[in-house]
Amino acid sequence: MKVEEKAPYFSVIIPVYQDTERLKLCLEALDKNDKKGFEFEVLVVNNDPIIKKLDLIPSSYSFSLKSLLEPNPGSYAARNKGIQNAQGNVLAFTDSDCLPDSIWLQVAYEFFQKDEKREVGILTGPVSLFFKDINNLSPAELYEKYTGGFTTEAYAKEGKAITANWFSYKSVIQEFGGFNSELKSNGDSELSGRIFSKYKIEYCPSLVINHPARYHTSGLVNKYQRLLGGAFTRRFQGNPKAFRKYLIQFLWARYRFALKRLFTLSPKESMPILQVCHAINRGAIQEYFNLIKGGETKR
């Protein structure tokens, strides 16, 4: 007689695009997670249509590892593929460059065990930055150090969450139709905002994900170009005047941040930050013209 396998409690969904080495570190961190009273599976969704097979060995881990392919570009399309194939009743989202804390899943499990009325739509927690060498920060790392990285607690109070650290009942995600796969950025804000209209978003300080600060300025430029594209797609298509106003506010916010640092930090730190802000703004202007001319959003 065949013994039926116990369904996993969690399905951890991780989109990946040309980031296999850091993905392996993420999987190793998940393999070290405490798991008292529950099982979990991990679904890695490859979003690279060219390299269709990832260099992963599923048998190397103590959990069930599934590798899926989503050729349509965008991490939200990839997450939706993971949702469609998930077996767990609670979905956990993180990113391929993240390192979950050793009790990440255990903390979430104990939280959901207490949610008897199933009132929680999203459980989220801190996303803590770490650096290659805290004593020798790159200009991009300096920028991330003083911008504070991810303000997930304040975000949760506004009724939003980010997919670097997100847990939801699968039924809740399905109720709202998953992520908007047309978006390359802001898809987590869009879905979490809709979920918040009906359910609670809870912030748990001990539910920790560790995220590397961006080391290269080009990574920050790409990040803000993606954010600009997400805002354009969601809010400003067909309204160029409002989008232009949004861009001006964006540019001023970066320079205002840099100017404040000139008066509060040493030139050794403030000048690189100013250079990074200028690079971000230059990239934002380039992306603005790309978008209003009908170009594709960045991924």
Image (cartoon, grey):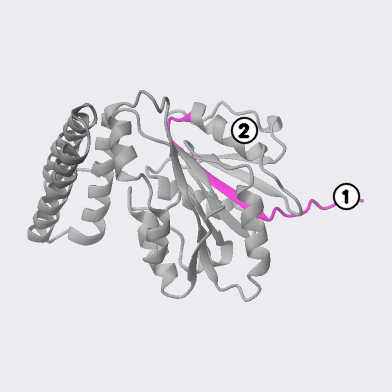
The residue closer to the viewer here, 58 or 128, is 128
- Residue holding disc 1: 2
Q: Dot 1: what SS? A: loop
Q: Is residue 53 magenta?
A: no
The residue closer to the viewer here, 199 or 152, is 152
The tag earlier along the polypeptide, 1 or 2, is 1
The percent position of residue 255, horizontal first and vertical second, equals 14, 43
Q: Amino acid at mark 2?
A: Glu
Marks 1 and 2 in Cβ contact (< 8 Å): no
The residue closer to the viewer here, 179 or 268, is 268
Left or right, 241 with respect to 135, comes to left
Q: Is residue 15 above or below residue 206?
A: above
> Which residue is at 38% across, 52% downward?
151
The percent position of residue 180, horizontal first and vertical second, equals 38, 57
Q: Amino acid at mark 1?
A: Lys
**Mark 1 burial class by Cα count in 10 Å: few <14, some 14-19, many 20+:** few
Q: How many marks?
A: 2
Magenta-drawn segment: 1-20
> Which residue is at 38% across, 48% downward?
150
- Residue holding disc 2: 28
Q: Is residue 293 above or below residue 173?
A: above
Q: Quadrant of the C terminus?
A: top left
